[in-house]
Amino acid sequence: MDKAGWHRSKSLEIPENIRIIFQPAYSLELMPVEHLWEHIRENYFSNKILTSMEQVMDTVSHGLVELGSSEELLGSMTYFPHLRISSLNAT
């Protein structure tokens, strides 16, 4: 889990059978979704002026749909060797 304030709140109730492990700061290799956002920012938002939240949402949706249709591109950005090992051990 990242170290966002709401994840470290003193009022956060953590069940006894859950162990929280905080990630190092700026650890993109542990957060594959960050690569998706970077791709969307660079390929769908660069050199554009969006004048409404609806345009922003439409642009994000369009980018995600296109990413979802390219299994190879999506896999190259998110399915890293250390995650493959973890997912194989989980089954």
Image (tube, rainbow, N blue to C red):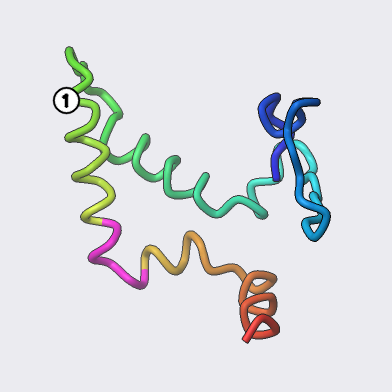
Left or right: where 70 falls relative to 74: left
Residue at x 36%, y 72% (from the top left corner): 72
Residue at x 77%, y 56% (from the top left corner): 18
**Residue farthest to the top?**
51
Q: Which range is magenta?
A: 67-72
Which residue is at the front of the view, 41 or 3?
3
Residue at x 48%, y 60% (from the top left corner): 77
Which residue is at the front of the view, 10 or 90?
10
Position of residue 41 measured from the top left corner of the image (x, y, whole percent)? 36, 35
Residue at x 50%, y 62% (from the top left corner): 78
Residue 43 sits in quarter:
top left
Which residue is at the front of the view, 11 or 51?
11
Q: Is residue 71 magenta?
A: yes
**If the image is split into quadrants, where does the C terminus sit?**
bottom right
**If the image is split into quadrants, where does the N terminus sit?**
top right
Residue 74 sits in quarter:
bottom left
- Residue 45 position (above or below residue 80): above
Residue under label 1 = 55
Position of residue 5 measured from the top left corner of the image (x, y, whole percent)? 70, 24
> Magenta region's main secondary structure?
helix
